[in-house]
Image (spheres, rainbow, N blue to C red):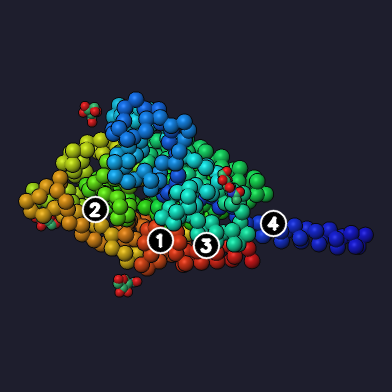
Amino acid sequence: MKYICILKILLIFMCVTLSDQQLNPVILIPGDGGSQLEAKLNKINVVHYICEKTTKDYFNIWLNMELLVPLVIDCWIDNVKLIYDNKTRTTRSPDGVSIRVSGYGSTETVEWLDPSHASTGAYFNDIVNTLVSLGHKRNITIRGAPYDFRKAPNENQDYFVKLKQLIEDTYKTNNNTPVMMVAHSMGGPMSLCFLNLQSQSWKDKYIARLITLSAVWGGSMKALKVYAIGDDLGSYVLRESVMRQEQITSPSLAWLLPSRLFWKPNEVLVQTEKKNYTIDDLQSFFKGISFPDGWEMRKDTEPYQLNFKSPGVEVHCLYGFNVSTVEKLYYKPGTWLDGYPVLLYGDGDGTVNRRSLEGCQHWQSMQKQKVYIKQLPGVDHLQILHDKSTLLYISSLIKHLRS
Ligand SMILES: *[C@@H]1O[C@H](CO)[C@@H](O)[C@H](O)[C@H]1NC(C)=O
Ligand SMILES: *[C@@H]1O[C@H](CO)[C@@H](O)[C@H](O)[C@H]1NC(C)=O
Ligand SMILES: *[C@@H]1O[C@H](CO)[C@@H](O)[C@H](O)[C@H]1NC(C)=O
Ligand SMILES: *[C@@H]1O[C@H](CO)[C@@H](O)[C@H](O)[C@H]1NC(C)=O
């Protein structure tokens, strides 16, 4: 009798220690451009005779370097761009183009943006490798939750439903263990939007914590710069004016414009000889660059930017600073919005302005769950995914929870 009791106590003890060691599963939420996209074509019209009209199956299209070379890039733009309908206030692919997000639930397509694993497409790979070294398993305790990053939350409502399902499934398959969300860049506000759709009791049950890396809490002047002149994604082979043709068609870009919560109405964002543009003049800015749809998309997405309710879960907010970041566009006297501005720089992570990265600080007084802030001097927007201090922070968090 005595021995059975001791055995029972031992078993209970072992069970308790085992469940203590259960790692919180991880859900990866990528940022703008941070997942693979696949396309299938059945087009009647193409922009150039070298462009393919039809394909038998889906092929990788996002940041496939073979498709971003001169001439072929025109075909690429005509496949990846979105067409805005100002009546339904939604976007669609050009006729004959079908785009899908590949690999939902697995880590592969958010670890690498290029299926060939070219180093330029390395995304969540270092974070996943670090997690694996601590006992995590790809596709089981680490799941990827990619989405069509060209669209903003207003057109991603079904993603939020799928994400809830993925979190519940991952919780169950891991012995009812709450998950840890790890989000980068635009994945931060996507996660916030998602969490604010859930009840507090759901969050208490399913979410252990949210870790954000370089999250864009209050938009960025970089988005305005992209509308003005485009962005070459840091690659010498791409031309920003060419990339711009595709970039400005994404409603997510409008969602990432500077937020009224973080920019004052008297701050000049764009300076020209004739007129200065503040956050209150975006409509006239879009008119000035002959892209009135940009203003419509801003109106569609701004409510999602202004809803800045705290997430109601434990937060670890990591971001870089002390990297020069576009703060203002200055068009020299004698030039206009169709010219090329001088970029004036301020503090940030090279992509997102510091005030936006710091947005999470406000939650410290807005919720009872802890909000930890970790600033990383000199760490840039993408580098944060591979930076030693980030990997160390995540590792020590996991080890600490285990002990
Ligand atoms: C809506 O789109 C149509 C066709 O592109 C255009 O003529 C019209 O001016 C647009 N309306 C607004 C409010 O932007
Ligand atoms: C995870 O799933 C993806 C997609 O199904 C697959 O390509 C990959 O090999 C899987 N990884 C592991 C480690 O099972
Ligand atoms: C624009 O702003 C600058 C500095 O903020 C100011 O010096 C200039 O006079 C303004 N120009 C116009 C046209 O209002
Ligand atoms: C910011 O960068 C400058 C030079 O780029 C450096 O001298 C300074 O120490 C840095 N500040 C911090 C807080 O890292």
Q: Are marks 3 and 2 in contact (CB under 8 Å)?
A: no
Q: Are marks 2 and 1 in contact (CB under 8 Å)?
A: no
Q: Which residue is mark 1?
A: 383
Q: In the image, what residue type sits under mark 2? A: Lys
Q: Which residue is mark 2?
A: 264
Q: Nearer the viewer, residue 299 or 35?
A: 35
For the residues labelled 1 and 3, the Cα–Cα distance comes to: 15 Å
SS of the residue at dot 2?
Answer: loop
Q: Are marks 1 and 4 in contact (CB under 8 Å)?
A: no
Crowding near the residue tagged with mark 4, few <14, some 14–19, many ≥20 C-alpha atoms within 10 Å:
few
Q: Residue shown at 45%/54% (left/top)?
A: 118
Q: In the image, what residue type sits under mark 4? A: Ser
Q: Quadrant of the C terminus?
A: bottom right
Q: Which residue is mark 4?
A: 19
Q: Earlier in the sequence, mark 2 or mark 1?
A: 2
For the residues labelled 2 and 1, the Cα–Cα distance comes to: 30 Å
Crowding near the residue tagged with mark 3, few <14, some 14–19, many ≥20 C-alpha atoms within 10 Å:
some
On whether ligand 3 comes within 8 Å of the CB at mark 2, the answer is no
Q: Which residue is mark 3?
A: 394
Q: In the image, what residue type sits under mark 1? A: Gln
Q: Nearer the viewer, mark 1 or mark 4?
A: 1
